Image (cartoon, coloured by chain):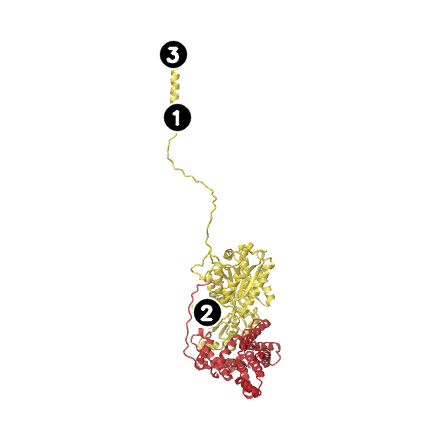
Chain colours: A red, B yellow
Amino acid sequence: MLTPTVWDASLFHASPQLAVSGEFVLRLIIDGLMIGIIYALMAIGLTLIFSVLNIVSFAHGEFYMLGGYIVYFFLQTFEALPPLLSIVAAAIVTFAVGFLFERIFLQPMARGEVERPNEYAILVTFGLAFFLQFLMLGLVGPFPKKAHRLFDLPQIEGTFFRTTKATLFLGDITISAGRLFAALIALLALAGLLWFMYRTWTGRALQAVSQDRNAAAVVGINPLNMNTLAFSMGAMLAGLAGAVLVTVYSWVPWVGVPASSKSFVIIVLGGMGSIPGSLLGGLIIGVVESLGTGLFPDPARAQAYRDVFGLVIFALVLLLRPTGLFGRKL
Amino acid sequence: MRKSVLVFLLTAVSMLLLVACAQQQQTEAPQVVEKTVVVTQVVEQEKVVTQVVEVTPVAGRCAPTSFDELGDNAIKIGVPIPLSAPGSVTGGRAMQTAVNIAVKEVNDAGGVLGKYPVDVVFYDTSGLPERGTAGMEYLITSECVVAVVGEYHSAAGLTEKEVANKYHVPVIFAETWNDDITASQYPEVFRIAPASSMVAQADAKYLSDVGVSFVAIVAENTDYGVPASEQTKERLAALGIDSETYLAEQGTQEFGALIAKIQEDMKDKEGLKAVLVLITGETSYNFEQQAAEQGLMPREDVVGIANQVAYNADEFWQNVPDGNYYAFRRVGVVPALTKDNPVATAFVEAYEKELGRFPESYAFEAYDAFMLMVKAIEKANSLDPDAIIAALESFDSPENGVQLAQGLYYFPYGTKNPVPDDQPAWMWHQWPDPAVLFLQYWQEGQSAEEACVVWPKQYQTCGDTYWIPPGTEPPVTP
């Protein structure tokens, strides 16, 4: 039996750390960049949809959630197959869901068959978000799931460089294997996307439609097909972000809500409709959040203020450049 | 002449005798005196009076206050629990299952007092204060519940107790630890979970026994986490252990930078260190896995103490696959402590049938809170809130207590026996005997039953060790 004692609360006190090592700052930057790349991947999907279809998809977070669950169940079901295939599966399924949704629900709007297209777009994407969220809640339940990291690191012993199956040690800097693989896959996906957008005819067609739909149509580009492609690709990018992060975070059906909010901040920060802006915005938010949390002098509040650090930068950029970093002037 | 003299003499003697007698009678005549006499008289008087009593109406409360008013309806008991984010869905579902088992058990036995069936009304609070208020309002004014049991999160519980007090509805909190739940000393509010201060004391003693010199307390920024971290810090300081608190929002996913910060802060600390997780529910998994992956803990020189949901082994290993050698707190009984208790055995069997695992502490508490309320209604033989509260208060000692699955419940302090000055205010309507144990996993994927009980000493199952360093085995295999 415990013997209760009289409670006498004391207040927290900040313990400011004035001396900060360079290794620590470097670690925070690396950490911020790794998570920032994944933020960027998701935000680029949202900006692609906005720039081509001129709508904001409120179901973007749910595609992120869907991508994560596909990887989780793929790895559970097909243990013998190479784990990277789970990422491919997530990309294919989220692309397909995005494709079907755009064809069935958004094409009528693009064809002018909907009276109030702006309101319709908001409602129909919100509807999709709720549908996907509660569908998954019904299918998999509310309990958290987490996919195992795609690969374990080989165990290496060294003085400066050493590894365990889960952790990479570079001197005092430690990097988690799951996070490292997630960032590398996201980086590859980003590289592929940029190549597609800037080096292929279809990618350039997408850019053309985003700049001027009528002019693009005059030169033989079908804007309706580009709409479908943009929405499907946007959904796929969100799905890819979820697919790599399900190995880092525990996954629940409502996991997409905060991720979606972050994407909105990033695309406004980078400039609505700008792919380079979203890329840079994602990296900035990732690094600022990491540095802010690590260097904030009151340890009791540092993590609690994490989102605030990114939003302060967001507010400052909007104050100085209301169109965002790479936004076009309206 | 002689004859005349003789007659004269006889007459004279007779006269003298008569006079003498007359004089004697004259001296014994009654005298008039004043005297005080005390008379006790019992008078029975029956009087019919009309009394005007001022009563404060409890507007909106619609529960019946007697079995006559109940009629053919079931007795409704409200159960606010978290069933969606950001609350602990794991905790809420476990409590829901436990309460359903209790309801079935009561109704299978014919109901309360063998004739009044009970009905349960769940409300999803998401662990949020505003939903706690809304939930209690709904349960009391729309569902007409007679009493309330449950809740997992202190943040919601703190607002729920205010509504219970407003409508004068008895409530037994099952898993809310914040001291203020009972410290406000509302007549309606009872608690069978430990108060934060009790747990903080156990945490500090355990860490002291392990021999740590520095503790990083990672707490959620809620009405549970903030006071719990303050109390733990205070008790650690009293034991000469340095500590630092790191707060995080409930529902946070990304902890990378915070983990880096803790590692940086610990770099200069000598000796054995510890990280104590005071984050509830699923959020704790995110922190624990990321901390393990980033090499913060568990290590030879860093004791990792996970949140109590780690007891749910299947879920823990799925979400914290690198969590081997995490220790975790267990409030309440472990399997070995239930074997001699038929109530516990029956509940464990029913729970394992439903969810396939040994009940968590909050499941035990939810079951017991419901059954205790039923016992109180039966003892009160009434649905009147005052009668139910009086019945609960009558469980005031181990001798008058109620044996349920987790222990022998009683509330030593209440209206009749106020909390003395040398005891904390939260001892009001507080069960004083919850057991606090520490367990530790030492093999990947093992069940909670296979984990070692490492503290307190009298319950140790793996030999005389408070901490199994990573990479080693316990001295004795359970």
Of the two numbered discs 1 and 2 on the same chain, state the one appearing first in sequence: 1
Q: Earlier in the sequence, mark 3 or mark 2?
A: 3
- Tell me where residue B406 sits by quadrant: bottom right
Q: Secondary structure at mark 1?
A: helix
Q: Chain of mark 3?
A: B
User: Mark 1 or mark 3, which is nearer to you?
Assistant: 1
Q: Position of residue B443 (x, y in %)?
A: 56, 73
Camera-nearest residue between B402 and B84:
B84
3 and 2 marks on the same chain: yes
Amino acid type, residue under disc 2 in the picture: Val
Amino acid under disc 1 = Gln
Q: Are marks 1 and 3 on the same chain?
A: yes
Q: Quadrant of residue A190?
A: bottom right
- As displayed, is residue B314 above or below residue A179? above
> Disc 1 versus disc 2: distance between alpha carbons?
104 Å
**Label 2: which secondary element:** helix
Chain identity of mark 2: B
Local packing at callout 3 (Cα closer than 10 Å; few below 14, some 14-19, many 20+) is: few
Front position among marks 3 and 2: 2
Q: Is residue A31 visible?
A: no
Q: Chain of mark 1?
A: B
Disc 1 crowd, CA 10 A, few/some/many (<14, 14-19, 20+): few
Q: Quadrant of the C terminus of chain B?
A: bottom right
User: Do the dots labelled 1 and 2 sit on one chain?
Assistant: yes
Q: Gap in Å between the C-alphas at discs 1 and 3?
A: 34 Å
Classify mark 2: residues with Cα within 10 Å, few (<14), some (14-19) or many (20+): many
Residue underneath mark 2: B226
Residue B25: give its label: 1
Q: Which corner quadrant holds the N terminus of chain B?
A: top left
Q: Amino acid at mark 3?
A: Arg
Q: Secondary structure at mark 3?
A: helix
Q: Label 3, on which residue?
A: B2
